[in-house]
Image (tube, grey):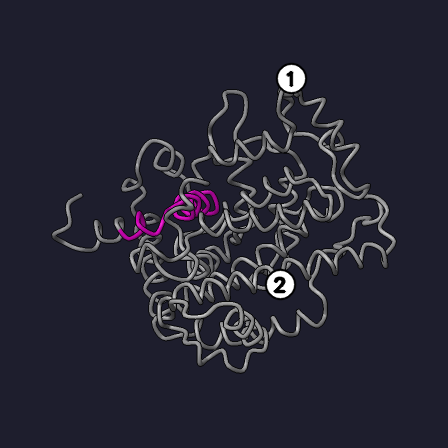
Amino acid sequence: MFTREDIEKREAENLAPYAMKSAESRGRKHKEAEHGFRSVYQRDRDRIVYSTAFRRLEYKTQVFVNHEGDYYRTRLTHTLEVAQIARTIARALRLNEDLVEATALAHDLGHTPFGHSGEDTLAELMKDHGGFDHNTHGLRVVDVLEKRYPGFCGLNLTEEVRRGIIRHSTPFDEKRAEGDDIPGPYLMEIQVVNVSDEIAYDNHDLDDGLKSGLLEEGDLQGVQIWKDAAVSVDQAFQGLSEDTRRYQIIRHLINLQVSDVVENSQKRIKDLGIEDISSFGEKRASVVAFSGDLEKKRSELKEVLLAKLYEHYRVKRMSYKASLFLKSLFKLYYNNPELLPPPQYMQTIKGTSGEEKYRGICDYMAGMTDRYALDQYKMFFEPYERV
């Protein structure tokens, strides 16, 4: 029989000295008895997987709105890809895979419908009422909004996973301090999730962009990292279909970036003299990172994605429509809270005003999937739609 104590012993024996050990966790806000066969981070992972917010990621999109096609990535498929990449990097660096997996699975729980357009819209609507960003809201989801246990609100996750949610940062996100009152260093496990998120979304946006036709291979001819990968695939395989060739190139790019992160991070650990967790202090030490050469090549790819995909007129149209839907629904709910579904939202918001009312409506709308938001808009603004 393999118990929690055995898991903790194996971690102590096999993980790197700078890895976060389960037995050394700062624990949870609300005291709970430990599980006999799962570590604290394995338990966090399972709570996240069974949460309502995690299931809703299936119908929350990245770049393409859900009804544009069922073969594009959603927040759920993206999250699973991030977790897979992050576990590979964590295992190679002898970090805590369970903590990395739990953090990866939770990193997008605070995202709105309609991707970054939805977040920007709610941030605009909430700018004078406490603000909105998906990291802070993700922490609110796991601390307050999930209702699953009789003794407390939220999922009661460990401080390390909560820290990973609020400190998640990619080039799409500003490095925020709001809500970051969780003590402790920027663990390497958190850094692994951040860099894995970058690898995942760059490559799957590239894949989806090419698949959709919004991005063409000709747009990538000036991007060295793409050219090198394409040459490698074409030399290794002959007569591939377009779909298979594209998949093999994307696969090559992911492997290249994961290997670079592992090798460069190992070098940085040695160069920076990282001996244990205390080496990080309270700083946002960037230990897990790409090499300078690959970062430069990646920047060329990101410039093309921005110019040719994210700024494509069809994507801009989808973003505009999404913003219009959310603004219209927010105004409708604020002026007519009786239209909100009982019991939790209508009863919470009815009779309130100001910040509390704004936050309640924001919580409700941030939790919507693309599909549900579209259905709500149709129900209220199309006269022949059934209610």
- Residue 275: x and y in percent read 86, 46
- Residue 116: x and y in percent read 46, 60
- What is the magenta segment's predominant secondary structure? helix
| Residue beneath the point at 64% across and 17% down | 1
- Residue 146: x and y in percent read 48, 34
The residue under label 1 is which amino acid type? Met
In the image, residue 174 above or below residue 232: above
Mark 2 is surrounded, within 10 Å at the Cα level, by few (under 14), some (14 to 19) or many (20 or more) other residues, namely some
In the image, residue 278 above or below residue 194: above
The residue under label 2 is which amino acid type? Leu
Q: SS class of the residue under badge 1?
A: loop
**Position of residue 32 in the picture relative to residue 325 (left or right):** right
What is the number of the mark on residue 256? 2
Q: SS class of the residue under badge 2?
A: helix
Q: CA distance from mark 2 to mark 1?
A: 39 Å
Q: Earlier in the sequence, mark 2 or mark 1?
A: 1
State which region is magenta.
Answer: 353-374
Q: Nearer the viewer, residue 310 or 226?
A: 226
Q: Residue furthest left?
A: 384
Mark 1 is surrounded, within 10 Å at the Cα level, by few (under 14), some (14 to 19) or many (20 or more) other residues, namely few
Residue matched to label 1: 1
Q: Nearer the viewer, residue 189 or 29?
A: 189
Query: Does the magenta portion include 221?
Result: no
| Residue beneath the point at 59% across and 59% down | 255
| Residue beneath the point at 63% across and 43% down | 100
Locate the C terminus by quadrant: top left
